[in-house]
Image (tube, helix red, strand yellow):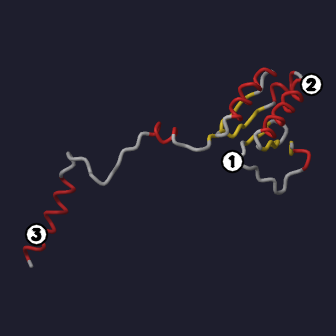
């Protein structure tokens, strides 16, 4: 019985005092590799000018990115250009079987076909279809 306690004591004391060896139970994961394996990406954009919509549309066409678009700078600058940009975004999302919706007065979200927007409790004026 004394041999059992001493072997048990040796096991626990050796694992706590010997910290020079790495523990085999842990795996180090590189955070950059885990980001690249994501299936869906949420990417913010700022619409400063009408020309900025091109990058947004190209990203949406890839089908793996949810676009979060801040429209405040263009809204403050030129409302006609903003309407053109939103119409172009809606047409592209429709062609890709995606969805477009507004959040408040300053943001628009556009999703590819593989993602959907929850519309429960939203006002009709905030939904761009």
Disc nearest the viewer among 2 and 1:
1
Query: Residue 77's spot in the image, x, y percent?
Result: 86, 21
Q: Earlier in the sequence, mark 1 or mark 3?
A: 3
Q: Nearer the viewer, residue 3 or 44?
A: 44
Q: In the structure shown, which secondary structural element does the residue marked by tag 2 occupy? A: helix
Going from the N terminus, do you reach mark 2 or mark 3 first?
A: 3
Which numbered mark, 2 or 3, is in the foreground of this view?
Answer: 2
Residue 93, given in percent of the width and then of the height, sits at 78, 38
Looking at the image, residue 115 sits to the left or right of residue 21; the answer is: right
Badge 2 or badge 1: first in the primary sequence: 2
Distance in Å between CA atoms under marks 2 and 3:
83 Å
Quarter of the image with the C terminus is: top right
Q: Circles 2 and 3: CB distance less than 8 Å?
A: no
Q: Circle 1 sits on which residue?
A: 114
Mark nearest the camera among 1 and 3 is: 1
Q: Give the residue furthest to the bottom.
A: 1
Foreground of the two, 111 or 108: 111
- Does residue 11 appear left or right of residue 128 in this picture? left
The residue drawn where x is 20% and y is 57% is 15
CA–CA distance in space, label 1 to label 3 = 60 Å
Identify the element where label 3 is drawn: helix
Quarter of the figure with residue 68? top right
Above or below: residue 116 compared with residue 49: below
Residue position for label 3: 6
Residue displayed at 70% across by 48% down: 115
User: Whole-percent x and y of residue 98?
Assistant: 76, 43
């Amino acid at each position: 019985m004394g041999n059992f306690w001493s072997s048990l004591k040796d096991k626990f004391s050796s694992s706590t005092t010997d910290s020079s060896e790495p523990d085999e139970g842990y795996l180090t994961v590189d955070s950059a590799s885990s980001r690249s394996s994501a299936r869906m990406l949420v990417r913010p954009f700022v619409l400063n000018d009408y020309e900025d919509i091109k990058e947004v549309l190209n990203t949406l066409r890839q089908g793996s990115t949810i676009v979060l678009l801040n429209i405040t700078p263009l809204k403050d600058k030129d409302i006609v250009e903003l309407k053109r940009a939103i119409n172009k975004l809606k047409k592209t999302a429709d062609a890709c079987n995606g969805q477009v919706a507004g959040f408040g007065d300053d943001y628009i979200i556009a999703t590819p076909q593989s993602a959907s927007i929850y519309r429960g409790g939203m006002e009709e004026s905030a939904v761009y279809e």
